[in-house]
Amino acid sequence: MIKERIDYENLDIATPRQRESIAELEQLNLGAQQIAEIILVLLDLKPATELLIFKHNDTPSHVQQVIEQTGLKVLPKPHEHKRNRQMTGILLVSKNRDYNLELLFNDGQIDQPIAKQRRYGQLMGYPNTAIDAYCVGGQELLPDQEEPNMAGIPFSMKLSRKGKDQELKLLQYWSKIIRKYAPTVYERALPTDEQDKIDF
């Protein structure tokens, strides 16, 4: 179950088994940010994530096998190679296949784009303030020139005007968790010029 209230001061959240699983995930030939997203799902900090697998990554079947060994559920999602010839697969990852993965898989069946965007944002673990701002067409999103310093945060999310402080706090927490449990992944996920500018 996803943690409803996060204690942003508590970084000691991984069980010994989860730590072993993180070490296994770190060995994947996959983008560092994608590995970080899987770790957040493993630690119950996000309901689900969607992985795009490319030719330069491990095969989708190998990635799926390693992820499933951690106890997470994986659902391959059909994709058209014509759209991106470098892409070899899309994998949906969650702790609960029956609920979260089926919702992600069936998003194409939703007639209303706003409902689809809202559900996708919730499954990705984004705060409701950010989801609401995104769904109203972006008018409530923070303009780029007003974005706070995001150095040290390997995750991307547009912040809302209304909830930017809490959203930034969540991104910083996720970043601290990845830095603690998967420091190599954390460093790989950051742009080179940001690695010495972390301010949280």
Image (spheres, grey):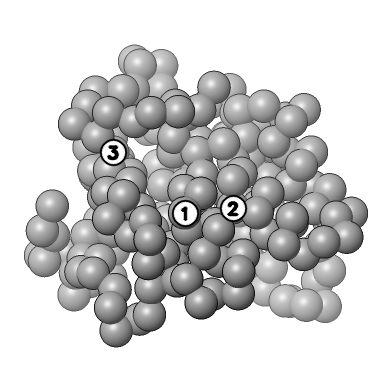
Residue occupied by mark 2: 121
User: How many angstroms separate mark 3 from mark 1 (CA)?
Assistant: 22 Å
* Snapshot quadrant of residue 62: top right
Which amino acid, mark 2?
Gly
Q: In the image, is residue 183 above or below residue 42?
A: below
Distance in Å between CA atoms under marks 3 and 2: 21 Å
Q: CA distance from mark 2 to mark 1?
A: 10 Å
Q: Looking at the image, which residue is at 88% across and 60% down?
A: 111
Residue tagged 1: 129
- Mark 1 or mark 2, which is nearer the start of the sequence? 2
The amino acid at mark 3 is Ile
Residue at position x 35%, y 81% from top? 144
| 10 relative to 24 in the view: left or right | left
Q: Are marks 3 and 1 in contact (CB under 8 Å)?
A: no
Identity of the residue drawn at 22% across and 27% down: 10
Relative side of 160 to 113, left or right: left
Q: Verify CB contact (< 8 Å) between mark 2 and mark 1.
A: no
Q: Which residue is mark 3?
A: 177
Q: Quadrant of the N terminus?
A: top right
Q: Is residue 177 visible?
A: yes
Task: Answer with left or right where residue 186 lies relative to residue 96.
Answer: left
> In terms of sequence position, does the residue under pointer 3 or pointer 1 come before the other?
1
User: Which mark is on residue 160?
Assistant: none
Amino acid type of the residue tagged 1 in the rendering:
Thr
Mark 1 neighbour class, 10 Å CA radius: few under 14, some 14 to 19, many 20 or more: some
